[in-house]
């Protein structure tokens, strides 16, 4: 009987222990394991916990919490991807700093502008870009809670300096917990260069117009004061006015031509051009002009010149401008040569004269608008200073290039290189 009672008591204790383990110990161990998995970002084995109502509720709550966490992490990832996509697509440098000007975020263009390696992160804005005026601008924007803007000059080694427009916009204007600023770096070098070119162009055009207009005004005042001029003097005055009228008209035509060439919508009327036929036609047109200045002409090209895909009227304008310069600056009795030859995938068309030549220091600038190596002589000969600039623009529109060689008192060669279109 004693062994039977002991066995019954042991079985009862084991049953009670199993029940306690199943209802109170095992569920909470499952809850603990579930919590550890969630904290460790591991996928839990299960969320449904049996044996204890409270543990089951906690498991279900942890499941909801995990689902919510996954949703938030997904949103964060999507937000990060969106920010990275926007930052990466920006053509301007952008950096986000906190209230102590410590860099929290920067895009690829900012790294490129300031030569910052990908491995470098953090640090203050001043440490990264070493430009005190930018640091001061950002500090003032954060302090005043007002956007600030300033232009700065950047230079890196021997490279040309660049002008950057820096904009600092404070963060969290209504929240002290979000102080900092977004700083935008925009390269405006090309814009400033265009503005400077425009100012120079307007100034040059005004200067070129002033001379003929002053002459017109002076002679008109002379005629108004004394209409009864001697016939010889009257003829001289009218010839001078006609010459300056022609110069004024040429200037207006060249300015309009250059404006059309530089307009964004400029399109060439491309067609197959028989270059030998074009060159022969041009030289026939210029025979009288050559003879007037007692110049000999020479045309030379190989028999295998290919067809060019080009705008024939524009190409003719190029050669006309080159011949016009050659005739103007040639001495009587000299020779003007027009030559074409094949160079690889391009055709070189050259005009050579035996004129006064161009100083070596002026050669790199002769294709600039209104640039003249000999200003007094150029105006005397009726030049507008735009011919070679027009040549350069037309050839660049064709995908080609221009070159110049000269020697003082021996002559000048201006060449244009036009790409060849090879037929299949």
Image (cartoon, grey):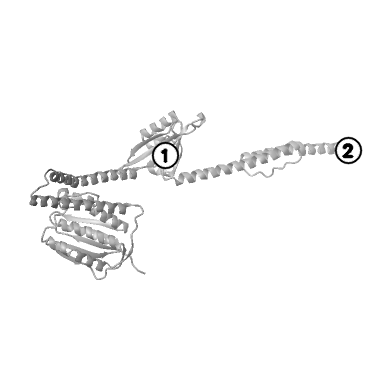
Does residue 51 lie above or below 343 as drawn? above
Residue placed under numbered mark 2 in the picture:
3
Figure quadrant of residue 18: top right
For the residue pair 12 and 135, the one nearer the viewer reads as 135
- Specify the farthest residue to the front: 228
Mark 2 falls on what kind of element?
Answer: helix
Label 2: few (<14), some or many (≥20) within 10 Å?
Answer: few
Residue at figure coordinates x 7%, y 49% from the top left: 230
Q: Which residue is mark 1?
A: 184
Residue at 13% across, 61% down: 292
Is 108 left or right of 347, judged from the image as shown?
Answer: right
Does 301 sit left or right of 26 as displayed? left
Write the residue at 18% across / 55% down: 406
Res. 268 in view: yes
Per the model, the C-alpha gap separating discs 1 and 2 is 90 Å
Image position, residue 217 (x, y; %): 17, 44
Question: From the image, which quarter does the C terminus lie in?
Answer: bottom left
In the rendered view of the protein, which quadrant contains the N terminus?
top right
Placement of 368 over or under 336, stated as above or below: above
| Picture coordinates of residue 202, whole percent (x, y) | 26, 45
Instruction: Give the crowd class for mark 1: few <14, some 14-19, many >=20 residues within 10 Å.
Output: some
Q: Image height check: is 206 above or below 24?
A: below
**Residue 295 can be seen in this image:** no
* Residue placed most toward the observer, 56 or 29: 56
Q: Secondary structure at mark 1?
A: strand
């Amino acid at each position: 009987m004693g062994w039977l009672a002991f066995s019954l008591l042991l079985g009862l204790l084991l049953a009670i222990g199993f029940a306690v383990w199943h209802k109170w110990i095992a569920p909470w161990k499952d809850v603990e394991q579930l919590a550890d998995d969630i904290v460790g970002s591991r996928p839990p084995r299960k969320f449904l916990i049996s044996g204890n109502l409270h543990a089951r509720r906690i498991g279900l709550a942890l499941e909801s919490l995990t689902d919510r966490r996954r949703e938030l992490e997904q949103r964060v990832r999507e937000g990060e991807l969106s920010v990275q996509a926007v930052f990466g697509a920006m053509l301007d440098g952008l950096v986000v700093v906190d209230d102590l000007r410590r860099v929290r975020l920067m895009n690829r263009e900012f790294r490129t502008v300031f030569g910052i390696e990908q491995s470098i992160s953090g640090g203050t804005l001043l440490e990264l870009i070493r430009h005190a005026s930018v640091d001061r601008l950002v500090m003032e924007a954060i302090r005043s809670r007002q956007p600030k803007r300033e232009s700065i000059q950047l230079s890196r080694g021997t490279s040309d300096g660049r002008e950057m427009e820096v904009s600092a916009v404070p963060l969290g204007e209504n929240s002290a917990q979000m102080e900092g600023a977004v700083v935008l770096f925009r390269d405006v070098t090309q814009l400033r260069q265009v503005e400077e070119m425009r100012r120079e162009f307007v100034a040059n055009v005004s200067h070129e117009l002033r001379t003929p207009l002053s002459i017109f005004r002076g002679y008109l005042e002379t005629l108004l004061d004394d209409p009864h001029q001697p016939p010889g003097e009257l003829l001289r005055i009218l010839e001078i006015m006609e010459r300056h009228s022609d110069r004024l008209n040429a200037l207006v035509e060249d300015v309009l031509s250059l404006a059309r060439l530089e307009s964004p919508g400029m399109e060439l009327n491309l067609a197959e051009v028989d270059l030998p036929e074009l060159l022969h036609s041009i030289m026939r047109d210029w025979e009288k002009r050559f003879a007037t200045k007692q110049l000999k002409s020479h045309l030379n090209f190989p028999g295998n010149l290919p067809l060019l895909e080009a705008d024939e009227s524009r190409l003719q304008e190029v050669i006309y401008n080159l011949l016009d310069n050659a005739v103007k600056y040639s001495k009587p009795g000299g020779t003007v040569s027009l030559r074409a030859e094949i160079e690889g995938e391009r055709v070189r068309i050259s005009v050579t004269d035996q004129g006064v030549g161009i100083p070596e220091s002026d050669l790199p600038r002769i294709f600039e608008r209104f640039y003249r190596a000999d200003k007094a002589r150029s105006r005397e000969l009726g030049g507008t200073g735009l011919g070679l600039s027009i040549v350069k623009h037309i050839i660049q529109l064709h995908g080609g290039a221009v070159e110049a060689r000269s020697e003082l008192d021996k002559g000048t060669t201006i060449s244009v290189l036009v790409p060849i279109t090879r037929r299949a």
